[in-house]
Amino acid sequence: MTTYRRDPEPPPADGRSTGRAVAAGTLTALAGLAVWAALVFPGRLDALTPAAFLRLPAEGLALLGLVLALRGRARQLVAVLAGVALGVLLMWKVLDLGFVAALGRPFSPVVDRGYFDSAADLLGDSIGQRAAVLTLIAGGMLAVAALVGMPLAVLRLARLVNRRRVLAVRTVTVLGLVWLNCAVLGVQLAPGAPIASTDAASLAWSRAGQVRADLRDERAFAEAVTGDPLRDTPADQLLTGLRGKDVLIAFVESYGRVAVQDSTFSPGVAAVLDAGTSRLNAAGFCSRSAFLTAPTFGGISWLAHATLQSGMWVDNQLRYDRLVASDRVTLSQAFQRAGWRTVSDAPSNEQDWPEATSFYHYDKTYDARNVGYAGPKFGYATMPDQYTLAAFRRLELAPAGRAPVMAEIDLVSSHTPWAPLPRLVDWDAVGDGSVFAGMPDQNASAAEVWRNPARVRAAYGRSIEYSLSTLISFVQTYGGDDLVLIVLGDHQPATIVSGSTAGRDVPVTVIARDPAVLGRISRWGWQDGLRPRPDAPVWPMDAFRDRFLAAYGPQPVGVLAGPGSAEPRRTCGG
């Protein structure tokens, strides 16, 4: 039978020793709070409430019991290892919060390690380079503090437990009984916040399973990406239904389902789309719309671009890296093989992009450096969408005697932080972009907008209205019989706009004046107009490539005309 000695009485203390004792007691209290917080700190924004920190963690009681049972170096080793584990756990929870808020999913160390550079760039565009640097420095210091400070905190508590063993045994026994009773009775401080907590152990177990699953998924993806029957399709069997057409794929940044339904700003976006449908119909254009489910949420747009183009589900950076190193056929490569001039227009790029030629097979790449823009920057956007489209027309569509063009154009005026925002000007006045000078100062800055979530949501809605209005005006002004425009979003906006329960659907629309172009997709069941209704068809984005190529490839006789159609109209509006 084990017996415990009574804890010795502390010796009388003078003023200096009293001060040291107070400081030591404060450090011990802080160490206890740090360990407690690391164990009960929630990994979800919606669970980040005061009640979350008033729970009793089973893992803390288990650690306390283990420290009581061990002696000497074994106790110290366990304390250090437990402290490191708690530091890693706390960092993981913080990363989960950030990833859920920005991307709608938890952090994964297997697939997310390549995002930190892009995150730093985005932070700089959102809050300024100086603030971004200070934020990153603070984040690094917090990470070091967690990995160094948590082991020191657990060591300090272990020493206290060793000195006060009787009190520690009584404490762990009483708290253990409280935890057990609360667990059996299901006592909760608030919905989803039981007093008897096992969150830390559950999180560690689930994340270990997630890592194993991610590793399996990536191995399967690496095998799947090598098998592409499109590689063997003859060039004369590709895109026969679009010969002679200029085909533009316009990605509208952050254009998600939330923009067109069930939000405070969706009525404004819907009004732009409905008015645009009428205007384009009057100009002889028709449109069909639906939804695509994007592989990403809140950001990392290049994953959506790669998914649409390759027909593979590219939902993380590791998959993207594997894909662009493969010989998978993209839509742009298929167009190139079929005789189109292929172009990428990515105005946010300010450095070379090797994959544009090595993987996407673009004949020409435009970015922030080579389109002659002399105007101001608008937040993340190096130039307004109107200038992007005007420069593309000047450089690619206006020259005479050219080959048909296929292009992917990225419209980024609706990119986070959604402020400041340009205004639409007369197309003849666009010039070199100097006409936009002064506009950023006439709008609220990103820092001002982001002080209030309601203002953030309103700014997002206005940015989508601007981008869509610009596209509609471009088609109305410059569109001809041979223009085919595919407009889609890349992903939903971040959680601050979309909410914590939003899905990943984005609108997609095909616009053309030639009725034969839309006749090719009549079997898709897409809805008339620029705005998809809530019950519009929903496809996974990786299904688009193969369905698109099938629709515009060689067709059996009679498929295109449809029942009762003798001769197609010359224009959609005819």
Image (cartoon, rainbow, N blue to C red):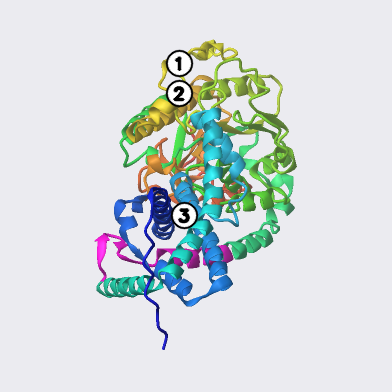
Q: Position of residue 99 (x, y in %)?
A: 48, 48
Q: Quote the CA–CA distance across marks 1 and 2.
A: 8 Å
Query: Magenta span has 207?
Result: yes
Ranked by sequence position, the earlier of labels 1 and 3 is: 3
Residue drawn at x 47%, y 71% is 67
Residue placed at 54% from the left, 35% from the top?
Answer: 122
Q: Which residue is mark 1?
A: 441
C-alpha separation, residue under disc 3 versus residue under disc 2 = 32 Å
Q: CA distance from mark 1 to mark 3?
A: 38 Å
Direction bottom: furthest residue: 1
Callout count: 3
- Identify the residue under disc 3: 93
**Residue identifier under label 2:** 420
Residue 55: image quadrant is bottom left
Q: Where does the magenta region start and end?
A: 186-212
Viewer-nearest residue: 344 or 183: 183
- Residue type, numbered disc 1: Asp
Tell whether label 2 touches label 1 (CB within 8 Å): yes
